[in-house]
Amino acid sequence: MNLQLNNKYALVCGSTAGIGKATAMALAAEGVQVTLVARNEDKLKAVLSELPQSQSHDYIVADFSNPEDLKTKVSEYVSNHHGFHILVNNTGGPAGGPIFSAEVEEFESAFTQHLKCNHVLAQTLVPFMKQENYGRIINVISTSVKQPLDGLGVSNTIRGAVASWSKTLANELGQFGITVNNVLPGATGTDRLAEIIKNKAHKTGKTEEESAQAMKSTVPAKRFAKPEELADAITFLASERAAYINGINLPVDGGRTKSL
């Protein structure tokens, strides 16, 4: 299938590892010119060197704990280079733990890194998308927007807020050829999952392998996703072929989520 992504520009957040990096690689393989965003410049340079050299790729160093700084840096980049047809919002999840014991500051920090940053990036990039009559905003969040996950109280709360923001934005921007969708990863083989498994093992007294197998047993596919499998879904949603898919939450979880 020709995804018709040649000569498109994409801004991919959290793109030095895991799903973000896999997405940058997948988009670049389809002919997209990718600009990476993360806070570690050395890691950004390393990923940049792995992208296909047939296109011109770039990066922006920014920290998602500071939305105004992020907005300033991306705005300057757009002014000096080009706008973006595709925005992939992807940020590391909040620390786990029961919601009752969470500090108020944990909610504030997560709200800033996820919803506020998504919002300022959308506001910065949408004018170009409107001009092009083509825009794809894809938010990588969590299956917890359909089924809250035990032990991830702050994350469940913030992910739900991002999903509602996204649906509202989709309704407002659809008339301009811009779609807004959410991809909901299940258990995916990333550093984040490794951390969750380690914490579960510590709390239960099981080995990490036993904890991992217990998690896999709850998935009909009986395995964890590969980051590349999430990237493929994101790449399709970014394409011309997905022009009439708007405002959805797409689980990529091997069937683990029990709701429809």
Image (cartoon, rainbow, N blue to C red):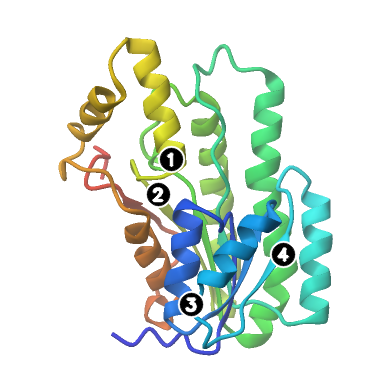
Task: Give the residue number, with chain letter if any, for mark 2.
Answer: 184
Residue closest to the eye, 202 or 19: 202
**Where does residue 33 sit, x and y in percent of width and height?**
57, 80
Residue closest to the eye, 32 or 120: 32
**Where does residue 241 sit, x and y in percent of width and height?**
37, 81
101 versus 222 height, above or below: above
183 versus 177 height, above or below: above
Q: Quadrant of the C terminus?
A: top left
Task: Give the residue number, with chain letter if any, for mark 1.
Answer: 145
CB-based contact (under 8 Å), mark 1 and mark 4: no
206 versus 119 height, above or below: above
Q: Which comes before the other along the chain, label 2 or label 3?
A: 3
Residue closest to the eye, 205 or 232: 205
The secondary element bearing badge 1 is classed as: helix
Instruction: Please name the amino acid that badge 3 sits on.
Output: Ala
Q: Residue at (52%, 56%) from the top-left corner? A: 139
